[in-house]
Structure formats: structure tokens, C-alpha cells
Image (cartoon, coloured by chain):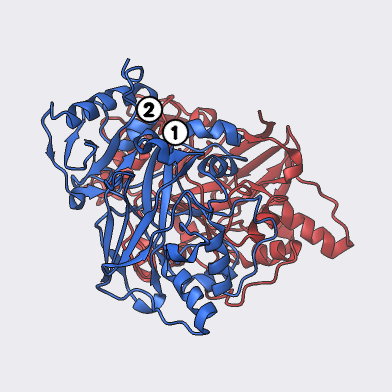
Chain colours: A blue, B red
Amino acid sequence: MARLCGLVEMKLGSLKTGQRDGSLVVVNDKLTRMKAVPEIAPNLQTALENWINLKPKLEQVYQSLNQNQCDAITFSAEKMMAPLPRAYQWLDGSAYLSHVERVRKARGAALPPSLLEDPLMYQGASDDMLGPQDPIRCADEDWGIDFEAEVGIITDDVPQGTTTPEAQSHIKLLLLINDVSLRNLIPGELAKGFGFIQGKPASAFSAVAVTPDELGSAWADNKIHLPLQVFWNEQPFGQANAGIDMQFDFARLISHAAQTRRLSAGTIIGSGTVSNYEPTAGCSCIVEQRVREIIDTGNVITEFMRFGDHVRIEMLDQHQQTVFGAIDQVVQKWP
Amino acid sequence: MARLCGLVEMKLGSLKTGQRDGSLVVVNDKLTRMKAVPEIAPNLQTALENWINLKPKLEQVYQSLNQNQCDAITFSAEKMMAPLPRAYQWLDGSAYLSHVERVRKARGAALPPSLLEDPLMYQGASDDMLGPQDPIRCADEDWGIDFEAEVGIITDDVPQGTTTPEAQSHIKLLLLINDVSLRNLIPGELAKGFGFIQGKPASAFSAVAVTPDELGSAWADNKIHLPLQVFWNEQPFGQANAGIDMQFDFARLISHAAQTRRLSAGTIIGSGTVSNYEPTAGCSCIVEQRVREIIDTGNVITEFMRFGDHVRIEMLDQHQQTVFGAIDQVVQKWP
């Protein structure tokens, strides 16, 4: 009945509790209050595994929260883990070809032949996801610490061989991602031919994941049609629109991943660094800025992140309301 | 006390129950009887997260099982899921350079420069692991269906920056792996530069994972010094010794993976296809056989697997007793 009443939107997160998966919380639309729901599901992974049954119950809590009709605690991003603090799968596409072109140019690599039809994607490490305010811990500044601001989805169970038209129904939640990259480790690693291990440390995620309906008309064609704001040390760095220049939408990314195998509930798929061909959109990662500098001036001006640097990634809706909360991280020397 | 009495060995598996992670079972040394232990841990992932506390309890059950002093059910590989039916991380090395050299030669790729010092490794899909007798489901024989017989380990929590000498203590369990590969999809995928997505469908695992002490003197230098037997349609295909020609031992593979990030409990790391330079050891995957044929005759004789083909992967100890049970899979057309 909940669905028939139009209650199809919701924001969910994982509260830090000292447990590996945190506690599932429903967060209100303004990101000011939240409520743990152990009677519905202990954590988000469990909810995703029983989505059809549990979603109506979660939606009822969301409605009560928004109407101040239930007990709640104060929401704060620093209390939050990643929505899935560990996941069984994290796949990251490279759906914005302006990013792919610029970054490959930076490392002297040619564009792959069938770039327009065949998505580029890598299998990332999913065992340790950072919360929105967790530090980026890194042993060496010389590794070339960079952020990559992305949008992403979480799926339910996706059967092997799912087609692109079929894939849309498997998109259950949306979220923001900082796909932290160690630029100076990547060329040597990719030269070995098997993808990323050391060049992609733990990624960070927004405080909440939201149902696609939360975005209203900004969710269309399996893309998020909103600007992704990126600030580096409080300075505006990028504002690319995630709905523009996305060559492969999320349904296409799902079908690509599922062509030869099924995907389990809780699979996270990222868009790759959001990027627009329009130069005034700025950049969602430092390496793109550096490539532009080379093109414009012949020299790299901007260095990578230093210990103590901050990066802030956020998306506002049509009413200038934060949708996911901000990813807001500092780079820390470790150990 | 259990540890002081010398009870440091154990075989563990995951019984099919209809639940995603199965039920943790302790299996006796002869792989004839097993006992579910929900009072200790519901599944293997949970046990790995609390290994120090739970291992002595599991060892007591193992001792009781071996002495026929507790109730048990009959063990059968077909009842078993992978020891971790889904994991938070699955990393696969390429530690046997004879394999790397031969396979790269097959696809016309050069050997990476620092091959002898820098491990080759890829991040695999860990959300759907096949049990030892689960079929290999594939839509198209023309994708070039191949097996890769490997040995592997499961870790507990590994801190970021763990060194190779420190890594040894994080090896908790050993197991066998069939890293199924779709050879004809791999060249195009690797040409894109980001590793495997479609070319590596779900991998299969042995019925049980065992503590390193189970192997006695065959576990030394962080390697398994036993032959890995491979049969294709009941014909002997390979018997390479997993302790020979392994350029990077499992401690080295762990430290490589953990250089820039921590690894969560339940991380599986594979050796890569076991391979010896000695030709009479045969092959642990079809593609190696094909390369040898090209070298010997100028032509490929052996085709890849067909629907209905079987592959059997097993390791016997010094007393000709199966250590892990056999991986025994058939290739099925899907859907």
C-alpha cells in the first residue's frame, strides 16, 4: 500500500556503531534527523537482500521522520560510515569520455578502439569503504594523491546476461563516491596489464544513499542530471553535470558487468570521474586539471594533494538542498 | 588450552542451506563427516572476523569429529558451497612466472619489465563464488572457456602497510580455486587497460578450506609444496607442484595488496595458475597447453572447453589423502 500512496522515496545510511557494517538508519529528507531500524534490518546489506519486502517498511519510517512523527537522533555526517561499509562488489566505470580522453592523454596512453560502444570498467576493492568524513590515510605524498568525484548506484541481485533495458529495474539506490587515486603508482601498475591494486586505495562514499525517486525529474535516462560540486581546500574546483557527456548510463554499465556472470545484491557501480567537455564545468579530479594546464600552457601548474588537504564533494538538488550530504575528507599521513 | 595440546589443524566448509552464506561446518580429516556449529559461528565469514576467540572452539569440534565423539552428518562435496560463498575481496596473483610467460606469449603481449620483483595481481569479482560441484554456466562456447587451477589463502584483518615478514601471521586458511577464464574475451578487455570484468566469470572453490598446519611439512615458506592434480574429462592434464617455481609466496602477495590499503578479514588471495617450468608437470589451464603446442608444432591442437566438459582439480597429501576435496565442475549452456 505504501507504494500505491506514492511513498517511493527514501534516504538510507549506516551509523557508526563499532560493528563492521554499522546500523541501518533511515535519514529524513533534510538530512537533520535519523532513526535506526533494527526491527526492519540490522544493516543496509540485509535490506538490499530483502528489498521488495523491506522497502515499504523503510518508506513508512521515512515518512514518519519527515513529518516529525517518530523518535529520532540528530543526523551528523561524522557519525556515518559508508552506506555499505564493506560490499561484495565495487565496479567502477569510466562513463565520461572527456575524463577518459584527458587522463589517458596525461599518461601517454592511446584511447581504446571501441570507446564509444564498449564501456571501460574496473573491478575495485570493496572490503573497506570509507565514510563521508573518514580521512584519506596515505604513507607517502609522492604517490600523487588525487580525488575522483563520481556518482554511483547500488543494485539488487542481477541475473547473468541481463540486458540494458532489463537492467534499469535493478538500480535501487544512488550515492556519491570519492574514488581516491594514487596517480604516481598507476602508470607502472597499469603497464602490467591487470588493472589497479595499489593505485586505488579505499574509496569514500556519501553519508546517505537515496532511492532514484528522491531526485524527481533529475533522475532520467538512468543518469543523474545535477551538477556535482567539488571543492579542494574550500576553493571551487568542479561543477560538472553528471547528466551531461555520460556516454554509458547506469543500465548499460550493469549489463556490461553482468554479461558473463550474475551480480549479487549490494553491488556498487560507479560512473567514473564526472566530467564535461564544457571547460567552465571545471574538473572532478586533479589529473584532469593538470592535463588542461599542459594543453593550455605546456606546463603542469597544479600539484597533487598534500597531507592536511581537504576535498569536499556534494550534489544539490533543484532547490539547492543537499541530496546525499557532502563527502568531506582530509588527507592524513599514515602511520 | 586446545592450542597447547597441539590441536592447531582444522578443515572448514560452508553447507548449502538456501541462505547466501550457507552454514559453517567443521569437516573431519578424511572428509567423510561434518558438523554444523551455529553455536560457534553462523558462517565462515563470522568465524574469520573473530578468529582468535573462535578457533579453539572449532578445533575442539574437529578433534571430536576425528575421534567419532560427536554427532555428525555425512560429508558430500555436492552439499557444499564455496568456503566463502561471497567474500568482500578476491585478489588473484600470477605468482608462477612460467604461466605468465606462456600465456602472455599466447596473446602476443610482452613480459612486464620488473617481473621478478613486482607481483602481478588482479582484483577479482567476489560477490558470487561457486561451490566445488557447481556448474560453470556460460552463454557461448566461442568465448573460449578455460579452467585455471590454483591454490589460495584466506586472511584475517591485514593492516595497511603490512610488510612481507609480518604478513605470514595473517594467513588463516588455505584452499583450491578454479579461476574460470573466458579466453576469447580477455584480449579485447585487457587492451582497454583496466583489467578483467567479462573475461573472468565466477570462480569455483574447494569444498573445504584448511588451516596451514593441516599440511604439515608441505606448508613451508608460505607455499604449498604438493602437486596440484588437474583432470579434463577424466584425462590427466596437469600435476604441477604448487611449491615449485612460485616466484612470490603468499606473504609477499599479501604485502603487495596491503601496501596502500588495509585488507578486511575474509580476503581471499589466489596464487594464479599453478605452473612449473618442468614440461612433464603438464598444465593447469588449457591456454598453456595451446602455447606449448604452438612452440612444438606451430599449430594449436587443443580447443577450449565445450558444453558438457568436466574439469577436476584436487590435491593429495603425502599419504595420498585428499586435502581439500576435489573441485569437479561441468560446463553448462546458460540460460
Query: What is the CA distance from the residue labelled 1 to the residue labelled 2?
Result: 8 Å
Q: Are marks 1 and 2 in contact (CB under 8 Å)?
A: yes
Q: Secondary structure at mark 1?
A: loop
- Res A317 → quadrant: top left
A78, A291: nearer the viewer: A291
Residue A174 rendering spot, x and y as whole percentages: 39, 42
Relative height, residue B297 to residue B115 (above, below): above
Mark 2 highlights which residue? A51
Mark 1 highlights which residue? A156
Quadrant for the C terminus of chain A in the image:
bottom left
Give the amino acid at mark 2. Trp
Residue at image x 35%, y 24%? B71
Q: Is residue A273 left or right of residue B230?
A: left
A140, B205: nearer the viewer: A140
A141, A126: nearer the viewer: A141
Q: Counting other residues with Cα less than 10 Å from the Cα at mark 1, is it few (<14), some (14-19), or many (20 or more)?
A: many
**Chain for mark 2?**
A
Residue A324 rendering spot, x and y as whole percentages: 30, 46
Q: Earlier in the sequence, mark 1 or mark 2?
A: 2
Same chain for labels 1 and 2? Say yes or no.
yes
Residue at image x 38%, y 79%? A142
Give the amino acid at mark 1. Asp
- Res B309 → quadrant: top right
- Do we see residue B129 in this rendering? yes
Q: Is residue A251 left or right of residue A36?
A: right
